[in-house]
Amino acid sequence: MIKPLLKPMKIKLHRFFNYRLNILDPISKSIKITQMKKIIFALSAIIMITCAENTKNNTSDYKDKNAPIEDRIEHLISLMTLDEKIMQMNQWTYGKNANPNNIGEKMREVSPEIGSLLYRSTNPEYRNQIQKKAMTESRLGIPIIFGFDAIHGYRTIFPIPLAQASSWNTELVRESSAITAKESWLSGLDWTFSPMVDVARDARWGRVSEGYGEDTYANSAFAVAAVQGYQGSNLNEKYTIAACLKHFIGYSLSEGGRDYHYSDVSNQTLWETFMPPFEAGVNAGAATLMSGFNDISGIPASANHYTLTEVLKEKWKHDGFVVSDWGSVRNLVEQSVAKDLKEATQKAFMAGIEMDMVDNAYVDYLPELVAEGKVPMESIDEAVRRILRVKMKLGLFENPYVDVVSEEERYLLPEYLEVAEELASESFVLLKNENETLPITSKYKNLAIIGPMVKDSVHIMGFWEGMGRPEDVKTIYEGLEKEFKNKATLNYALGCDYDGDDTSGFDAALQAANNSDAIVLFLGEKRHWSGENGSRSTIALPKIQEDLVAALRKTNKPIILMLSSGRPLELIRLEKMADAIVEIWQPGTMAGPAVAGLLSGRHNPSGKLPMTFPQTTGQIPIYYNMRQAARPTLGHYQDIPRDPLYWFGHGLSYTTYDYSAIKLSSKKITKDQTLIAEVEVTNSGNLDGKESVLWFLKDPFASISRPIKELKHFEKKSIKAGEKVVYRFEIKPERDLSFVDSQGNRHLESGDFYVIINDQKVHFELVE
Ligand code: BGC
């Protein structure tokens, strides 16, 4: 019999301060279990006999590490009972939640037969002990796969993914993901629920912070970088962990940016905008995917056979498994496509979800669904096959345990912190810099350092801070003290809190400003204002923060506005009041040195926006690759300027870059030729820098309307002051000039095209 995993009722605390009650009662429905007992017993007996038969014919032993993986899997499946198979599909939690989200199971309550644990402890020894139970006390010794949300770091916290995308540095993102993998693995993990590759265009949706912004190609490129970083070149090796592409699919289109809500996604948008990053991640070898909470045009993502099976497994040939999102099997009842949890189980499982995250629905209902003939045994076997395949690829059967080393050897190593600072500083976006207010040179001897972010060590880590600790964070203030020691006096004042209406700190802030040559003002969002369940009706900062800027403006001192947020912000009022503006996002552990380095000029800013900053919240959705309007000059909101405040791709530097004319290897190409586009970029200023060139293509006429332009390639390079560097884009027609229809079929149509960089637009033709 399947061992009950839960007490009759569990209360799961919501991780986002509002308490969410989640009553998990069905596992110990002993009445139901008793009723089903006879059927299941009979079924198990039949299966055992069949297993024995199969075993006789199989030559490979699943324990033989030299045998081919597929043979080992088949052998193992042939030995497993239905209960054992179903237990492989079950994930429960172990350990205290870092966010007060759930109450974990105690070690002794963990069944040795369980397939997976969401492991919320940092202790590798506990993991090894639990794993030992699985290896020695379960009948067949099948290892558990331990997963966790290491989203932008485990203990060393890197900038949030949206910030990572601003760096346009895929190599750094790969490196930071590899560090995350190593810290995670040494803490007992085999698997992270990352990267999130939901293309996001509504900044009210808090989870924009978790992905790589509004562009499909950018999400695809960073998906690949993150998967490669986590998984390394061979999952079998130490320090690598399985990646999980999420949330499959269309979740970011939740209506009005309200998290968990309905998403109306046309098939054209699904294929054109949302599918490519997942496909890129699958092609990069991502071992797993997670389904979404959203209802995709009437068929929830967690019950969607088309996306989960027809596309993912049949078309893309993904051979790993899909885990449901937290409780998303149960949510099918709320979403009104299943009358009860049993039907939800059937729908989710038959749609293609192999592992059930924390609902215990599979354990409860799959046995009877099989007995009733509603779920075929072949489907159970196929699901288990996929889970075992990932475990085999991870090498868990041979090496079920992780190394135990001291925390000092495990976390926050100097080389990790170096990458964290580099990635943070490359992610900062200099939005405005009137009269070269920045960097802060000797012209400013006294600096007013004001704002709730200055001494913060919590919000600066962003949402999903892994196992990051505030005491590890180098605060902005610490960074500034070190950077400006003997160079400038810092006059600190809090000014105000993040929200509320207490203006009692304004006077001290004004005094600090009056005693200084310039004001560096650190405003922004608390960590849970973005991230999961972090939707906001307005993306403006709270009034108190705007009032503080207005009050300080009256001093006539230059204002350098430093913004820390998990989303684009509405800056329509603030922009006019600031001389310089930098978006620093949520930079993580090395916030202080990175920010201080940017202010002093030690780091030359090189970030560019991966998401458009609208004028106002009402301008959402606005993104660079919209379709052309019928009357392009008309139809805009009458009360605000037509364009957003800062477009996707915007970002300044302390130096200047001059672009040559774009050179094309030919004006005409055929479908099987490659067109070489090149541009030479000169650093014409006095500071060394790094410049990202974003290459766009435009297809002005096609049988399915095309966006105004589309990012197809990007590259970041260092350019020393006075030097020139050539950037190159090899345009391959099938890959770069084709487009998909609503069924995902690619079309390549000859005709006119344009290569676009900044304000340059160069024509070429694709001929038959
Ligand atoms: C989130 C996922 C996350 C999971 C496990 C869910 O609520 O939507 O992104 O991976 O919890 O913590």
Image (tube, grey):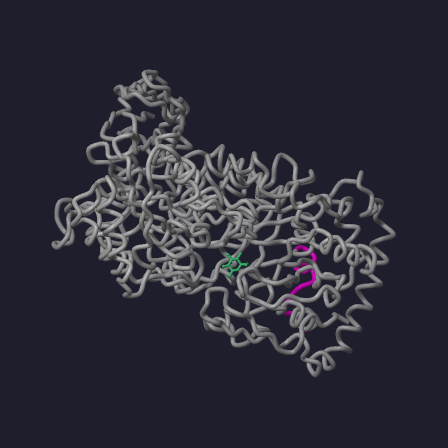
Indicate whether 484 appears above or below 368. above
260 in the magenta segment: no
Q: Nearer the viewer, residue 703 or 266?
A: 266
- Which stretch is magenta? 372-382
- Give residue 36's position: percent from left, percent from top: 72, 78
- Give residue 689's position: percent from left, percent from top: 36, 25
Indicate whether 663 appears above or below 747. above
User: Which of the 4 quarters of the picture holds residue 448?
Assistant: top left
Indicate whether 761 appears above or below 590. above
Tell me what residue is drawn at x 39 percent, y 40 percent.
Answer: 480
User: Which of the 4 quarters of the picture holds residue 203?
Assistant: bottom left
Tell me what residue is drawn at x 46 percent, y 73 percent.
Answer: 336
> Among all residues in the image, which is located at the extreme right?
56
Indicate whether 653 appears above or below 108. above
Q: Nearer the viewer, residue 522 or 384?
A: 522
Quadrant location, the C terminus: top left
Tell me what residue is drawn at x 43 percent, y 45 percent.
Answer: 587
- Give residue 64's position: percent from left, percent from top: 82, 43
Residue 533 left/right relative to 390? left
- Give residue 408's position: percent from left, percent from top: 65, 43
Residue 75 left/right relative to 195? right
Number of numbered discs present? 0
Q: Nearer the viewer, residue 456 or 232?
A: 456
Q: Nearer the viewer, residue 63 or 383?
A: 63
Residue 93 left/right relative to 196? right
User: Which of the 4 quarters of the picture holds residue 168?
Assistant: top left
Quadrant location, the N terminus: bottom right
376 in the magenta segment: yes
